Amino acid sequence: MLPTTILIDEAPRCIVRPNDTKDLNRFLRNAKSYLLAEKPDGKITHRSASDEELAKWRSALALHQAWGGSDEDFFGVPL
């Protein structure tokens, strides 16, 4: 999958790149307390990442790779 922005009440919270829809759904289920930490009653949605969000994603991925991390081991970054 392409990098996906996770939104809380339509505000970007993080950008992740799951392997498939099943991974995305698992992340949303397992990360619910993290995602809703500041807004416990918030609504979680997702969409394709914007160009600005992709730039942050690529920057974080480059940092991850600079210390020797692999592309497959990098999942996401808070926004």
Image: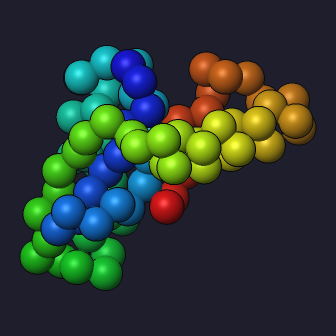
Q: Residue furthest bottom?
A: 38
Q: Residue at x 17, y 50 (%)?
A: 45
Q: Residue furthest right?
A: 67
Q: Is residue 79 visible?
A: yes
> In front: 4, or 32?
4
Tell me if 9 is positioned left or right of 23 in this view: left
Q: How is the image coloured?
A: rainbow
Tell me if 49 is positioned left or right of 59 in this view: left
Q: How many marks?
A: 0
Q: Residue furthest front?
A: 51
Q: Quadrant of the N terminus?
A: top left
Q: Measuring from the top left, give residue 77's x and y in whole percent.
A: 55, 51
Q: Is residue 76 visible?
A: no
Q: Measuring from the top left, give residue 26's x and y in whole percent.
A: 26, 35
Q: Measuring from the top left, give residue 67's x and y in whole percent.
A: 88, 38
Q: Residue at x 24, y 23 (%)?
A: 21
Image: 24 above or below 42: above
Q: Measuring from the top left, give residue 7's x and y in whole percent.
A: 27, 57
Image: 70 above or below 11: above
Q: Residue at x 43, y 55 (%)?
A: 14
Image: 49 above or below 14: above
Image: 44 above or below 64: below
What is the quadrant of residue 19 in the picture?
top left
